[in-house]
Image (cartoon, helix red, strand yellow):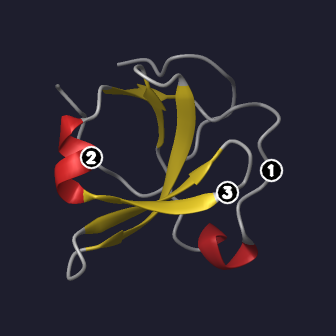
């Protein structure tokens, strides 16, 4: 698949699973991307799995206000609005 490069604070849509996720961290040494989904659940995805996912950039959901306070310092350039991100 053709996944966009990972960026902290950016939202992505997994087109296969129709799931939204926000990148809250990148752990180079462990080889994982830390994500938080639109329900507020935190998880991690291995780099090789990330690269194989069918992801597209996505704008921050309007109703989203659920980043953990400790995650908020890492988040940059979050857009307002909903829908696919403009190029």
Q: Is residue 34 above or below residue 3?
A: below
47 with respect to 64 (left or right): left
Q: Which residue is mark 2?
A: 50
User: In the image, what residue occupies the spot 55% across and 31% down?
Assistant: 19
Residue 32 drawn above or below residue 76: below
Mark 2 to mark 1: distance in Å?
A: 24 Å
Name the residue nearer the viewer: 14 or 64. 14
Q: Where, by quadrant of the figure, is residue 15 drawn?
A: top left
Q: Secondary structure at mark 2?
A: helix
Graded by Cα atoms within 10 Å as few (under 14), some (14 to 19) or many (20 or more), the crowding at tag 1 reads few
Would you say the residues marked 3 and 2 are in contact, meaning their CB atoms lie under 8 Å apart? no
Q: CA distance from mark 3 to mark 2?
A: 17 Å
Mark 3 / mark 1, whichever is N-terminal: 3
Of 78 and 5, nearer the camera is 5
The percent position of residue 25, horizontal first and vertical second, equals 43, 68
For the point 68% across and 42% down, which residue is it?
38
- The residue shown at (34%, 19%) is 87
Residue receiving disc 3: 41
The part of the image, by quadrant, that contains residue 79 is top right
Q: Quadrant of the N terminus?
A: top left
Q: Is disc 3 placed on a helix, strand or loop? A: loop
How far is disc 3 from disc 1 in space, using C-alphas?
13 Å
Secondary structure of residue under mark 1: loop
Residue annotated with mark 1: 65
Percent x, y of residue 50: 27, 46
Q: Is residue 24 visible?
A: yes
The location of residue 81, given as percent across then percent down, is 69, 25
């Amino acid at each position: 698949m053709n996944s966009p490069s990972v960026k902290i604070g950016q939202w992505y849509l997994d087109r296969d699973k129709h799931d939204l996720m926000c990148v809250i961290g990148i752990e180079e040494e462990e080889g994982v991307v830390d994500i938080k989904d639109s329900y507020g659940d935190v998880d991690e995805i291995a780099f090789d799995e990330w690269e194989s996912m069918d992801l597209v950039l996505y704008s921050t959901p309007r109703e989203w206000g659920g980043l953990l306070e400790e995650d908020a310092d890492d988040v940059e350039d979050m857009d307002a609005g909903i829908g696919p991100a403009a190029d």
